[in-house]
Image: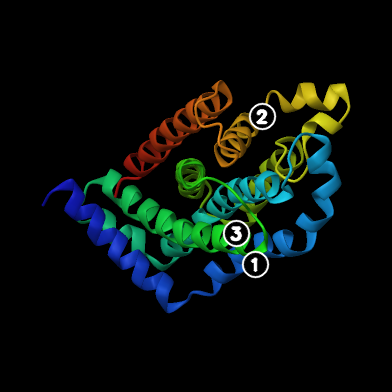
Amino acid sequence: MTFLRQSFIVWRRQMRMSLRNPVWVVVGMLQPVLYLVLFAPLLGPIAKSIGYDNAYIFFVPGLLVQLGTFGALFAGFALIGEKREGVVESERVTPANRTALLVGRLGRDVTQLFAQVLILVVLGFAMGLRAPVGGVAIGCALTLLIGTACAAASNALAMGTSREDLMAPIVNTVMMPVLLLSGILLPMSIGSAWLQRISDLMPIRYVVDAVRGAFSGEAGVSTVLTGTGWAVGLCVLALWWGTAAFRKEQA
């Protein structure tokens, strides 16, 4: 059986499980939608002060990265439940490729993220977002790329911790500085100089800037290319970590 076939089988099973209990997909989508409806209208003056005529061109890309990053970081909790129920152990006694066990799950996570991204973009256009179609496509692709990276890292962490009470504090500790220092909600240019210097060390900030650049029609500028490079680099690193974690777990 080929690697792609094995990955597809894992993806199909994971999708069936998700469709039987779609509440987590809805819950993961609820927070960004609330931010879009309740918080974005307050950003009009701030967006204009930094050169954006439309506040949604600034805010929707940030929400996309938030959805791709934070939603994907919780993917590993489902894997912990599967390990506890013996699902992962049953898969490991089969001749299935260990990497396929990870890729199939990542396919499920990316499929769910893609559906959520489409809903958020459509809602953004309904509320006043105006952006070129090509730029939106590039921004969505970057969101899926960083989502893949975070989902792979979450699955690797889940394989290492195997307990929700250990994994939750780690995820929350990572999420808070990323949310506050990556410019997802507010532009870092309005912050103090020392905050901006710390923000420069946040790789996710460059991804956020790249998605915003794509939405504003600046797909060829260095900002977009830099963010794309960071997204690809983080994805490769996370896939390596996730693959190593699944291969390390021997039946």
Nearest to viewer (mark 3 / mark 1): 3
**Which residue: 31% across, 45% down?**
250
How far apart are the alpha carbons under marks 3 and 2?
29 Å
Identity of the residue furthest to the bottom in this view: 20
**Mark toward the start of the polypeptide (3 vs 1):** 1
**Mark toward the start of the polypeptide (3 vs 2):** 3
**Which residue: 85% across, 22% down?**
194
Nearest to viewer (mark 3 / mark 2): 3
Say what amino acid the circle numbered 3 marks.
Answer: Phe
Asked whether the beta carbons under mark 3 and mark 1 sit within 8 Å of each other, the answer is: no
**Mark toward the start of the polypeptide (2 vs 1):** 1
The crowding category of the residue bearing disc 2, from other C-alpha atoms within 10 Å (few below 14, some 14 to 19, many at least 20), is: some
The crowding category of the residue bearing disc 1, from other C-alpha atoms within 10 Å (few below 14, some 14 to 19, many at least 20), is: few
Q: Is residue 219 above or below residue 28?
A: above
**Quick check: 10 left or right of 234?**
left
Say what amino acid the circle numbered 1 marks.
Answer: Leu
Residue 23 position in % (x across, y down): 54, 74
Residue 249 position in % (x across, y down): 35, 45
Residue 237 position in % (x across, y down): 44, 30
Q: Which residue is mark 2?
A: 202
Q: Which residue is mark 1?
A: 30
**Which residue: 66% across, 46% down?**
57
Q: Is residue 136 above or below residue 112?
A: above
How far apart are the alpha carbons under marks 2 and 1?
26 Å
Asked whether the beta carbons under mark 3 and mark 2 sit within 8 Å of each other, the answer is: no
